[in-house]
Image (cartoon, coloured by chain):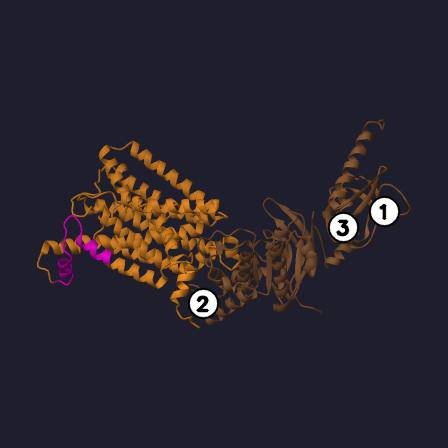
Amino acid sequence: MAKPFNIAHCFISGRNRPSRAVLWGMLSFMLIFLFLLALSVGSVSIPLETTLDILMHKGEDLVLHRIIWDLRFPKIFTALLAGAALSVSGLQMQTLFRNALAGPFVLGINAGAGLGVALVVLGTGAGITLMGNAGLIAQLSLFLASILGAASVLIVVLSLSQRVQNNVTLLIVGLIFGMMVNSLVSVLIYFSEPEEIQSYLIWTFGSFRGVTWDKLAVLAPAILSGLMIALTTVKPLNALLLGETYARSMGLSLKSARRLIIMSTAILAGSVTAFCGPIGFLGIAVPHLCRGLFRTSDHRVLFPAVLLIGAALALISEIAAQLPGTQQTLPLNAITALLGGPVILWVILKRRIAVNA
Amino acid sequence: MRKSKLSASSLSIGYLQPPSVLAQDLNLDLYGGELVCLLGPNGAGKSTLMRTLCGLQGLLQGSIEIMGRCLSGLSPKERASCFAVVLTERLQLGPFSVRDLVCLGRHPHTTGFGRLRPRDEAVIEWAMQCTDIAAIQARHVNELSDGQRQRVMIARALAQETPLLFLDEPTAFLDLSGRIEVAKLLKHLARNTRKAVLMSTHDLDLALSVADRIWLMGGQGAFQTGAPEDMVLTKAFEAVFCGKDILFDRMRGSFKARQAFSGVIALKGDGLRRFWTAHALEREGFKIIPQEGRQEPCVEVLEDGAGWTSRFRGRHQKHASIYDLVTAIRALKEDRDLSRENGGDI
C-alpha cells in the first residue's frame, strides 16, 4: 500500500533535501536547457529563436542551418553519449572494486586505446594530423587502431579476471598493465618527430568535435549496446555492494557478473576513447555526485541518475571548452578536470572527516 | 526420529593450496528450531567449517546434505535459498538505507533488475518486525550503532527466507547488552521460525546461557558436540581451552586466569558475600579452605554487612570492603615473600 506523501515528514526526517521526484524533474529540465544552450552558443552565437526556427526547418540561412545540423548536433549527441557512457562505466568500476577512486580507465582501457593511436600517429611516420582535415582513410585507421588497442587490453584483462581470485588483485593487475602499455607509448614518443608528438598530445586532450554523423552512426550503437549490457549488471552490482562473500552467499556468480561488468565497461569506455580521446574525471566524479544528490548507493537509482548527470556534465564541459563568443577552444580534459577534481577532493576529504569524527 | 536440515558425514575441511586439513571425519547435524554455538580457539577452523557447510568453500572429503539434497549438486541460486549468512566483515557501502539493505536479502528471489513484488515486500516487513528495526528503516546504515547494524544484517539474512542461518561471530563488536540482545533474538528466531541457526562465537558465557547445542572445535582436528552442560561435565571445555594460564571453573562454567599459588587461606562466613570474597581471594592466588579452629591466615565475613576481619602473620585487621581486604592481604603477603627471600632473618 502506498503511503501518502507527507511534506512535513519529509522536512523533519529528510534533512531538507529535495525529494527524488523533484531531483528527476530538475535533471530532465536541465538537460533540455543545456541541449538548447549548446545548440546556440559556440564560435558563432545563434539566438535561441533562430535555433528553434532552424530546428523547425523554417530558417532561410543555409550556413546557420549547416552549423546547427552538421556541426553542433553531432557534437552534442557525442557529448551526451560519451558523458553517459563514461559515468556508467565509472559507477560499475567503483562498485566492482569497492574503491572510491576507480573509474572507467582503471583496467587500462585508455592505455590500450592510446597505444593504438600512438602506433598510427607516431609509428607510421605518416604525420597524420588529427584535428585538421585528415583524409577519411587516415581518420578511419586511427579509430580502428584505438578500438583494437582498447579491445586487446580488454581481452587480456577479461581472461585474467577469470583466473584472478579477488577483485583487488584484478585492480592492481589492470593498473600495472596500463602503466606498461603507457610506457610503450612513451618509447614511441621518444622516437617521434615534434609534429607527430603534437598530434598525439592533441588526441590526449580529448574532444567531442571530431565526430560527424557518419562516425556517430558507429559510436551511438556501440554505446547503446554497452549501456544495455550495463543495465543487466544493475542487480549484480547491488549484491556486490555488500562485498564478494555476501554476494556469493546470495547466489551471485562472481565470474559471470565480473565478465558482464568488464565487457560493458570496455565497450563504453573503449568506444568513447576511440572517438573522443581519453576523457578524464567525468567517470570518477559523476557517480560520487549522484550518491551525494540521491543519498543512496542503490544502482537501480544510480544507473539512471549517473546516465543523466554524466550526459549533462559532459555537455557543460563542452560548452565551457568552447569559450562562448570567442574563436578559441580549450582542451576538453582541462575543463573536465576543473569540474571533476573538486568533486573527487570533496569525496576524499569528507571521508577523512567521517573517519576522524 | 528428527529430520535434520543439514547433515555432513565424514567431512574433511581445509585448503588445497597450500594443502592443509583443519578437521576431518566430522559428522554433523543441524536441526530446525535449534541454536548451535560453534566454539573454538582462533585458527581451529570455525570460519572454514561454516564456509564449507554453506558451499562458499569446497570440501576436501565427505559429503554434505541439505534437506536431503547433496550440497555440491545445488546451483548457486539454490544454495542461496538454503543458507543466509551474517559475516564479520565491516560494510563499506556508502549511503544506503536500512530498508534498502534488507531488500538486498531478496536477491535470490527476484529476477531482472531486482524488482520487488508484493510478496517480497511482505517478507521484508516481516524481517524488519522480527529484528525490531522497522522504526529505523529510513536511516542510513553507516549512522547506526554496532548493535543496530548487526540487527539489520540479521534482518537481511531473514529476508533471504532460508531454512538455515549461519552467523560468524555476530556478537564480536557488541557491548554486553548488545550481545545478549542478539543472542536472545537468534534463539527466538530458531524457536519461532524453525530455522537451524549456527553461530560461531568466542563468548563462552553467552553460549552456555543460550545454546541448545555446542560444536566445539579443539584445533588439530578435535571436534566435540553436546548440550553446553554436557560439555562442562565431560571436561571438553577444559581440554580445549585450558593451558598453563587458564583454568576452567566447572561450578561456575567460566574460565579464569591461573594465578601463582600464594598459599592456603581459611574463610569463614556464608551466602553471597562469602562467594565473592572467595572469588577475590582466589584471584589473588589463594586456595580456600573452610575455617576450623584458629588457623592462620584466615578471613572472616562478618554478618549483617559489618565488613571483614583478617588474621595474617599475627596481625588482626578489619576491612570495610573486599578491595581493602585484598589490598591489605596482598601487602602482607609481599612482605612475607620478601622476608622469605632474605632467608627469614629480618
Can residue A105 be seen here?
A: no
Q: Earlier in the sequence, mark 2 or mark 3?
A: 2
SS type, badge 1: strand
Which residue is tagged 3? Answer: B276
The residues tagged by marks 1 and 2 sit, at their Cα atoms, a distance apart of 68 Å
Residue B4: give x, y in percent of width and height.
Answer: 66, 65
Which residue is tagged 1? Answer: B289
Q: Disc 3: which chain?
A: B
Chain brown in the figure, letter: B
Chain orange in the figure, letter: A
**Disc 1 vs disc 2: which is toward the camera?**
1
- Looking at numbered disc 1 in the image, what kind of residue is underneath it? Ile
Q: Do marks 2 and 3 share a subunit?
A: yes
Q: Which mark is residue B116?
A: 2
Residues at badges 2 and 3 in contact (C-beta under 8 Å)?
no
Comparing B292 with A254, the one in front is: B292
- Residue visible at 69% across and 58% down in the picture: B209
**Disc 2 vs disc 3: which is toward the camera?**
3
Crowd class of label 2 (few under 14; some 14 to 19; many from 20; radius 10 Å): some
- Looking at numbered disc 3 in the image, what kind of residue is underneath it? Trp
Report how many numbered discs are placed on residues in the image.
3
The residues tagged by marks 3 and 1 sit, at their Cα atoms, a distance apart of 15 Å
Specify the segment rendered in magenta.
Answer: A33-57
SS assignment for the magenta stretch, majority = helix
Comparing B166 with A120, the one in front is: B166
Q: Disc 1: which chain?
A: B
Residue A56 lies in the magenta stretch: yes
Residue B67 lies in the magenta stretch: no
